[in-house]
Image (tube, rainbow, N blue to C red):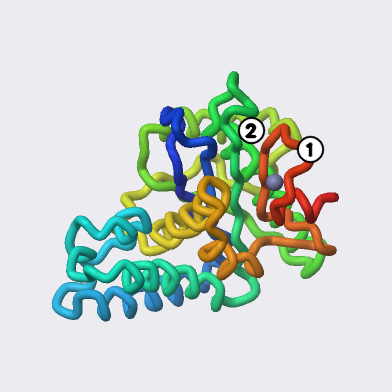
Amino acid sequence: MYICYLDDSGSVQNASEQNLVLGGISVYERHTFWFTQQLDDLAAKIDSSNPAAVEFHASEIFSGRKPPWNKFPNKEERIKIIKDVLQIARNSYRENNIFACVIHKPSYPKQNPMEKSFEELCSRFNLHLAHIYARDKEQHKGIIVLDESSYEATLQKMASDFRCSGTRWGKIRDLAEVPLFVDSKACRLIQLADHIAYAVFRRYESGDTSYLDIILPKFDKENGVLHGLVHKTVDPDCMCPACMSRK
Ligand SMILES: [Zn+2]
């Protein structure tokens, strides 16, 4: 089984932001413990007396206002923590791949960007499982795990609709019926997904590639096409890595 942990960055409502990102990592079931251990080790360096209380949340680390991040007055130090988290995804085994979908909100004014990105990622993750079957002749089921959020009811219903009637790109066969929603405090891999979504958001919203550069090699890809990174925009001249790989 593969578990795809997803989180969002950017906001559906905030009109001052152009983009919404849903992103995260697909992890082979036997590797979840490795990720948790790596992130626990990093948490112990932040607060050795109570590492379990350290929750990695990229935008909070960046702003440095709340504990324990206010212990690091130097912004460069806090940026390094975000990059150390991303480096764990980069260093992980080849079975684990990153996925993200960026929606340029003004390009699709009549659609809910969260629903659009979720549909896209369900389809990509399902295709990824089909590629694994074609390559290794191993049939794997997939399950999607998301942070608890206000989108829970909408996304639960969408996922079961996809399973019955398919997405616009075809029927979802290999995913478990409904996604799971968990508390990010209790799930290190959702915290990692938060950093992945943040890295992609920074690239598209602010032109800051320094976070995305760390994880770019881990996106699902085949024959030079970055299947794992999707940029939904009406701009035909976009030069981002996702659009360029499809030209
Ligand atoms: Zn693009």
Evaluate whether residue 160 shows in this view.
no
Between the residue at mark 1 and the residue at mark 2, the CA separation in whole angstroms equals 28 Å
Residue sitting nearer the eye, 186 or 13? 13
Image point (49%, 74%), residue name: 87
Label 2 element class: helix
Look at discs 1 and 2 and give the one toward the viewer: 1
Which residue corresponds to mark 1?
Answer: 236
Pinpoint residue 160: horizontal percent, then vertical percent: 56, 32
65 left or right, relative to 194: left
Image point (39%, 73%), residue name: 80
Residue extending furthest toward the top: 110
Pinpoint residue 90: horizontal percent, then vertical percent: 56, 73
Residue sitting nearer the eye, 110 or 122? 110
Q: Amino acid at mark 1?
A: Pro
Ranked by sequence position, the earlier of labels 1 and 2 is: 2
Evaluate whether residue 242 shows in this view.
yes
Image point (78%, 42%), residue name: 237
Q: Is residue 25 above or below residue 230?
A: below
Asked where in the image residue 104 lies, by quadrant, the reply is: top right
Which residue corresponds to mark 2?
Answer: 162
Q: Amino acid at mark 2?
A: Phe
Label 1 element class: loop
